[in-house]
Image (cartoon, coloured by chain):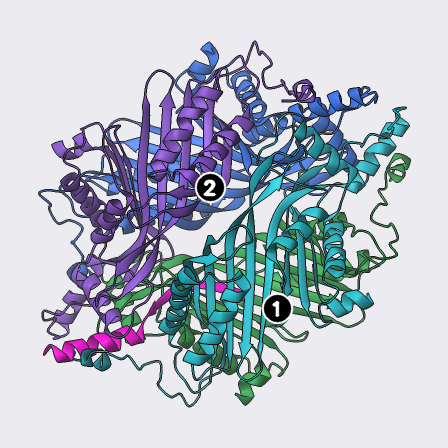
Chain colours: A blue, B cyan, C purple, D green
Amino acid sequence: MRLGDIIFICDVQNRRLTNGFKLTRVGVTGVMKPVKIKRPDGDNVLTCYIDIFVDLPSDQKGSHLSRNLEAVAEMVDESVARPVSGLEMLTAMICRTLLDRHEYASYAEVRATADYFSERSGPSGKVTLEPFKLISKATARRGNGMTKSIGVEVIGMTACPCAMETVKQTMGEEGYEPGDFPTISHNQRNVSSVLMEVPEEFDVEADDLISIVEDSFSSPTYELLKRGDEGRVVRKAHENPKFVEDVVRDILGRILARYQELPDDVLVTVRSESEESIHKHNAFAEMVTTLGELRSG
Amino acid sequence: MRLGDIIFICDVQNRRLTNGFKLTRVGVTGVMKPVKIKRPDGDNVLTCYIDIFVDLPSDQKGSHLSRNLEAVAEMVDESVARPVSGLEMLTAMICRTLLDRHEYASYAEVRATADYFSERSGPSGKVTLEPFKLISKATARRGNGMTKSIGVEVIGMTACPCAMETVKQTMGEEGYEPGDFPTISHNQRNVSSVLMEVPEEFDVEADDLISIVEDSFSSPTYELLKRGDEGRVVRKAHENPKFVEDVVRDILGRILARYQELPDDVLVTVRSESEESIHKHNAFAEMVTTLGELRSG
Amino acid sequence: MRLGDIIFICDVQNRRLTNGFKLTRVGVTGVMKPVKIKRPDGDNVLTCYIDIFVDLPSDQKGSHLSRNLEAVAEMVDESVARPVSGLEMLTAMICRTLLDRHEYASYAEVRATADYFSERSGPSGKVTLEPFKLISKATARRGNGMTKSIGVEVIGMTACPCAMETVKQTMGEEGYEPGDFPTISHNQRNVSSVLMEVPEEFDVEADDLISIVEDSFSSPTYELLKRGDEGRVVRKAHENPKFVEDVVRDILGRILARYQELPDDVLVTVRSESEESIHKHNAFAEMVTTLGELRSG
Amino acid sequence: MRLGDIIFICDVQNRRLTNGFKLTRVGVTGVMKPVKIKRPDGDNVLTCYIDIFVDLPSDQKGSHLSRNLEAVAEMVDESVARPVSGLEMLTAMICRTLLDRHEYASYAEVRATADYFSERSGPSGKVTLEPFKLISKATARRGNGMTKSIGVEVIGMTACPCAMETVKQTMGEEGYEPGDFPTISHNQRNVSSVLMEVPEEFDVEADDLISIVEDSFSSPTYELLKRGDEGRVVRKAHENPKFVEDVVRDILGRILARYQELPDDVLVTVRSESEESIHKHNAFAEMVTTLGELRSG
C-alpha cells in the first residue's frame, strides 16, 4: 500500500451516527462473474449473477461495499486454480469472507443464479444439451454458523387434468368413445423450482434436483425432437396430466424419498408456475416448509 | 418568462460542430403518461409508454430533449378536455409538434404502447374483460408528409398440427381408432401482433385488429372459464391446429379481406410467437410487407 | 344455471388425496385489470397487476382457480359504480372474498401493483405529471383477521457522499479551494420503495408515502426541467449527498414522525437501490422491521 | 435411421398451399447454448442466446424448425473440438447450414448475444474483470453471398455538459469562482452499443469495439474502486462531459479512424442510452449508416 493510498481512504462510511437505524441488508446487486465450478463430467465455467449483503449497525453511516466486490473477485480468481464444488459452496465461501471483512456486521447473505447446461436423452434416445438455472443462497450469523441452500429452476410441460375430464364428458355425451388413448386437454410451458438447505456434513447435487423436477412434470421438454419423438412427448404429457399443485407435491414427495438422511430442520421451497395456454395469466403453486413438516405431513 | 430564466438558457446543445456526424434518432425513451382516448363505449384513460425522437444535423451538438417532453405534456393536457381518437392520432400529433419545435430537425419519430382492456364473450356467452396491448408509431419528414401506424398485440392459443398428425399415426399403428374427435397435440400460449399503416383519409380501428388476430389463433383465450367452457376452448383449439406460420397467414388474409379500400403502399407487419410447451425455446413467424404485395401474392 | 352446466362441473380439483402435502400458496399470477380508485382530486382508473392465492389442505387435489378470477372480476365491476378507496382496500376485499369461496382454505393472500401518476412542482414551480408505482398486499387467516399493506415505489436521485469527500481531498492536495459550493461526485437514478401495514382503524395514504420517499432522496426527479431548473436539481442533489443507507434511514425516520399514532406491531419494509453510475452493478439497502422496533431504536 | 422413424416423419409442414403468403422470417427464438469461442488469452465458453430464421415460400405450409436446432447443435458440438473464432463466425456458419437444410428457403438470418468478460485496469492500475455483451447477426441470400456483423454492448458513465454549464452560470451569479476544477452536473449509467458489418476478407475484433465504446464515454466504469480510484473516475467523467449524442459521434469517429481499410458499403449501427439521474425516463441517440456516408459526412 502506497502512502498516497492511505490519504485517499474515504471514511464517510465509518462516521458515527447517534440516531441511526439498524439495517437488515446493505450491499450490491447484479454483480456478474464467470465462476469455474466442478462438475462430474469436467469443470464448467458458469456466468453467475450475484447479490451480496451484510447488515449494518445503527451507529454506522455506511457499509463498505467495495469489500463485497473484493470478496467475490477473490473467489473467482481462486476458482480458476481450484474450481468450487458447487454454486452453494461459492455463496457460502463469500458469506464467510464477508463477516471477516465487515467487522461491524453480524449477518451476511449471498444469493446467486447461473445458467447451466446438461445433457438429456429424448424419448428415442437422442441426446440434447438442455438449459437449466442454478439458484443458491447462503446466510451467516456471526458466531452462529451458516446456512447454505442449493436449488434449480427447470422448464417443463404440464397438461391439465381438469380440462381433460371435461372433454371426456363432452365426448361421452356426443356419443364418442374416449377409449384408452389419452384425451385432448390444454398443455403449456411450466417453470418449476426447488431451493433446499444443505446442512454442513451433507451433500445435495443440483443435477439430482434437476432430475427430481423433470420427473415431476407431465413431461420434460427437449430442444430437438425429430420425427416420432414429438408425438411421444405429447403422449407422455397427456398420460400424466398435472396441475401445478401436483407438480409441487410430486417434487416434495421425491425429495422426501431421495433425502431420507437429511435432518428435520432442513428448509425446502418448491414453486411451480404454468404459462396457461387457455388463459392470459399464469397458474401458480408454492410450498415453503421443512423436511420435518413434510415427514409428519 | 422572467428575466432570470433567460440567463439560464443552456445553449450547449446549440453549439456548432465542424466535424460532427448527422444522427438518425435523438430523443427520450420510456416516458410514461396517462392519455384519454376516445372509445366506442366511453372514453378510456390509457397508461402510455412513449419514445420520442428527431434527427440531428451534423453541425449541431445536441438535441433539445425537453421539447420532446413539452410536446407530450401538452397532448396529455389537451386529451383531458378533448380525448384523442386513437393511439396513432396521439403519436401523429406529437410528431407534428416535434418538427415545429425542433427547427433543425428534418425527421421525427414517435412510438407508443398502452395496455388496453376490452370485453369478450366466452364460448358459453359469459363476458370477461380481457387485456390487450395497443401499439403505435408515427414518422414525419419535414415538407414530406407523415405516416402513422396502429397495431395490437394479442395473447391467444395455438395447437400444433404436426404433432397431432404424428400422434394419429401412432394411434393407427397401435390399433386405436382416432375417429372424428380431435387428437391430442401440444398447445401453448401464443403472442401475435399486427402493425399497420393508416393512410391520411382512412380509418383503422384497433378493436377490429384485435378481432382479426383473435380469429386467427387456434382459439382465443379467456380470463374466466367456468365448467364446460374450458373444455370448449380446448376442443376449438384442437379443431383448428395452427403453426405460427398459419397464424401470420390467417391474419394477413383477414387484413386483405377487411381493408380492400386501403391503397397498395400500406405497410403491414405481422408477427406470431408461440411459447412452445414441448420446447424451452419459442417458435416465431413474421411477415413485413405491403398490401400491394399481398394482393399480387 | 342450466342443467348442462351442472354436468360439466369439473371436480378433479375436489378429489381426495391420502398422501398429499399441504401447500402454502396456490393461485394465479399476472392478472391484469383496470380498477377505479378514489383519489383526492377525482377518481382514477389504474391498470392493476394482481396475484391471488389461497392455501390448500393436504387431502385436496386442486384449488378452484376460477374462483380467484371471479373474485377479482366482481371487485372490478363494483369499482365502476363505487370506486375503491385505495389499492390496499382492493386487495383486502379480494382476500375476504377468497376465504368465502374457497371453503377449504384457511389462508388467502393478494398482491397488486399499479402505475400511478401524480402532479409535482419542479424547483421553479412548473407542474409536471410524474409516474409512480403503487404496491399493496393483503393476507387473511380464517377466523383470525386480516392484514393489509400499502406501499409505493418511487424513482429519484442520489449523489454519493464518499466520492464527494475523496474528490475534496484531491482538490485540497492539488491546491484547489473547494469552497462552499458543492463538489462533484457520482450521482444516479435510485429506485426506493416502502411497504407499510395499515391496521384496521387507521389510514395511510399512498400520496403521503410518495412524499416521504421523495423527500428522502438527494433530490426528487422531474420529467420536464427547463432552463435553470436542471441546474437547481443537480445542486440540490449535491447539497444532500446520500448513500442508499441514508435514503432508507431517512424514509424510516419520516415514517416514525408521520405515523406516531400507529401501533407498535405495524410491519414496515423499506428498500433503496441505486443504479450506480460508476459501477455496472447496483447498490442496495433494506430494512424489514416494525414501528415498535424503530421506536425503541 | 430405423424403419420406424421413417413412418413417423411428420410432413404437415410440406403440405402445398395454393393461396398462401410468402413469409419473411420463420424460425425459433431464445435458444440457449454454451459455445466455445477463441480469444487472444485462451478459449472462452460463452452462454449464447440465439434466434434462427429462414424465409418461407408462399406455397409451403410450414418451416422445418427442428432443422434450425440441428444446425445449432452441430456448431456447438464442433466448437468443443475447434473453437469458433468469434460470435459472428458462429452466426455466419449457422446461416450457411440453414440454406443447405431448408432447400425451400432463399434467405437465412441468425442473431446471437452472449455475456462476455474482459479484464480492465482501473485508474490506479488495479485489474478487474468487467462484464460486456457481444452481439452478432448474419444473413444469407441463396446464391447471393452472406453478410455478418459483430457488435458489443458496453455499460459506462456520462456526465451532462448542459447542466454543468447551467450550474457554472449560477455559481458566477452568486459570486462563486468556478475555477479550473470541474463543476457538478448530473451523471448516470449509460448503455452504448455498436453493431458493424464485417466484410468477407476483413477482421473486426469485439475487444477493439469494446475499447472504442469505453473510450467514448465520459468515463468507463469499474466493478471495484478502492480509495482514490472512485474520485478519479468521477473527476475524469466531469472533465469529459458528454451528451448521448456525443457518445454516438465519438464512437463513429473512432470507428472511422480504426477501420480505414474497410469498404464504403459496411453498415454501422451505434446507439447510446443514458438512464438519466435527474429524470425518470432515458436519453437516447442512434446512428444507422455506412462507412461511406460517414467518410463523406
What amino acid does circle 1 point to?
Answer: Ser
Mark 2 nearby-residue class (10 Å; few <14, some 14–19, many ≥20): many
Report whether residue C91 is seen: yes
Q: Which mark is residue D149?
A: 1
Q: Quadrant of the C terminus of chain C?
A: top left
From which residue to which does the magenta span run?
A: D151-175
Query: Toward which corner of the image does residue C86 lie, by quadrant?
Result: top left
Mark 1 nearby-residue class (10 Å; few <14, some 14–19, many ≥20): many
Residue B202, relative to residue B194: is it above or below? below
Residue A159, relative to residue C46: is it above or below? above
Secondary structure category for the residue under label 1 = strand
The location of residue A53, given as percent across then percent down, is 31, 41
Query: Toward which corner of the image does residue C230 lie, by quadrant?
Result: bottom left
Residue A289, relative to residue C178: is it above or below? above
The residue depicted at 15 percent of the width and 49 percent of the height is: A14
The location of residue A116, given as percent across then percent down, is 55, 42
The location of residue A80, given as percent across then percent down, is 46, 47
Chain under numbered label 2 = A
Left or right, A182 with respect to C59, comes to right
The location of residue D92, given as percent across then percent down, is 68, 63
Q: Nearer the viewer, residue D214 or B248?
A: B248
Dot 2 and dot 1 within a common chain = no
For the residues labelled 2 and 1, the Cα–Cα distance comes to 30 Å
Q: Which mark is residue A113?
A: 2
The residue depicted at 43 percent of the width and 14 percent of the height is: A293
| Residue D164 lies within the magenta run | yes
Q: Quadrant of the N terminus of chain C?
A: top right
Chain under numbered label 1 = D
